[in-house]
Image (cartoon, rainbow, N blue to C red):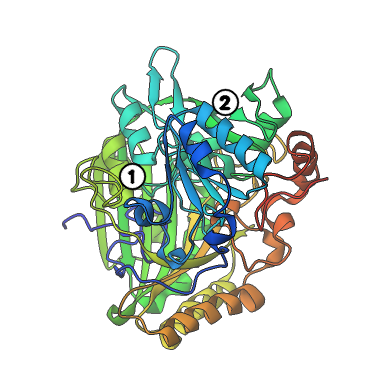
Amino acid sequence: MSRPRVSRRALLGGALGAAGALVVAERSAPAAAGGEPSRYARAPWSRLASGLDGRLVRPGQPRYPEAALLYNSRFSDLHPAAIALCRGSDDVARCLEFTRTHDVPFALRSGGHSYGGYSSSPGLVIDVGGLDAVEVDPRRRVAKVGAGTQLIDLYDAVARHGLLVPGGTCPTVGVAGLAMGGGVGVLARRYGLTCDHVLGARAVTAAGDQIGVGPDAHADLWWALRGGGGGNFAAVTSFHLSLEPAPALAVFSQRYPWGRAAAVLEGWQRWIAAEPDETWSNCQLFSEGASGLVVQVNGVYCGSSAALERRLTRLAGLVGPASSSFVAGDDYLEAMRVEAGCASLTIAACHTAGEWPGGVLGHEAYAAKSSFVGAPEGRARTAQWAAAVERLARDAPSLGGGLAFDGYGGAVNRVASDATAFVHRDKVAGLQATYSWGSGSSPAEVGAGARWLRWLGADVIDPAEGAYVNYIDPTLAHWARAYYGANLARLSKVKSRYDPTDRFHFAQSVPLA
């Protein structure tokens, strides 16, 4: 069987993620309120521009349309007054001083993937994408990584030395947002979250101080930056990450008839909860639009494909035989390229077209909700999840979307819930509900997808299980408790110490104590 093409468009995150899932074209949708750029037009932007090593981009300039666009094209109507394409930490400090002096709102942007559009601002966008150097010390197994480094470039840099760092799947996500929100990925059960590998960082505070952060310096901020969410406490400009030797890997993807969806999800939860750390997997129930409903189990195994086949025998005993199956051995970088959906592309091509020389990847329009599974669920509950996907297919038949359950446990759950700011250390799986749309989707169907998400949040998802801050959700009630749980009070104290006037503020930023 040929290796399927991976798409992030319908469901995000997973080994051979949304293989065969609906690929949608970019389409604008009503965006979240972003303010009028003219409101801040009288700020002395030329003064800021003259002091930057990088470049300040304003409306009307040739590069502005490209620079203003976030990854999620549903936010294409956001128009910042200016975008600072920073070249170093001094640029970031100058930008923060400018916004403080002239009372201009701002947003920090690394990869621009915020699910809520919080990578933009009606004032100044402080873009650290140019801070993308990766320096690897193979002897000490440590990397210094610029905050704007995109994941595919980080993986490429460490793989050259036979090393790895666990992280997410989308190739153009910026490391800053990923690491500060936790960093769930396909190697998490074996090696932990990205934030568990943050040894230290450099950051610019709201007061403009450039500081080193780690266990022996500003330890409270170091704690908060490991799972407390991006853009809340300070502007991080680089990280020091611990690395691991890269083992042989094997990847797999299996499909099942839709009529067995509830049984497969039930059995998969029992299987992954009992698997050794070397196994990571997710279970997807999704609609491919006109192509129908799909049940898919994907995974990455730290070991040989022969050993993986033995692990899958136990899965088959719980869920029955797959209707199609793909298993293959890969090295670390190739497995990450498979996950990224660009196995057939060069590293340069695994970037967004128009924003990177040689990049060919597109934008997408999507919306999502997240939650967690605290314990393996029985048939009544898994049947409810299957029925939810059927409802999406019925109400919005041309949209791609559904549910992805990502396995937790292993190294993720062996870390205490208060050891880092990432609190969700006792889950069997993370859950993401997603729908995406394209140029052929009618406004009525896009609206139906939105109603489907609202219905899930109100009637199906258990709010007590929490939510993942890297899948930040502007519609989520009681979001601070959902993202941070028992760590919220401590995070608010850190926020009050390093940002007492709440300069790093957005709609769902950590509140002051």
From this viewpoint, which residue is outermost toward the right?
513
Q: Residues within 10 Å of mark 2 (few under 14, many from 20)?
A: many
Q: Which residue is mark 2?
A: 202
Q: Position of residue 99 (x, y in %)?
A: 62, 42
| Vertical comparison of 245 with 495: above or below | above
Kindly tell me whether residue 422 is visible in this rendering.
Answer: no
Q: Is residue 11 left or right of residue 377?
A: left
* Viewport quadrant of the N terminus: bottom left
Residue at x 63% of width, y 48% of height: 104
**C-alpha span from label 2 to label 1:** 40 Å
Which of 343 and 448 lies nearest the eye of the viewer? 448
Q: Nearer the viewer, mark 2 or mark 1?
A: 2
Which of the two labelled residues, at mark 2 and mark 1, occupies the earlier sequence position?
2
Q: Residues within 10 Å of mark 1 (few under 14, many from 20)?
A: many
| Vertical comparison of 75 with 211: above or below | below
Q: Which residue is mark 1?
A: 308
Q: Amino acid at mark 1?
A: Leu
Q: Position of residue 430 (x, y in %)?
A: 55, 56
Residue at x 43% of width, y 31% of height: 87
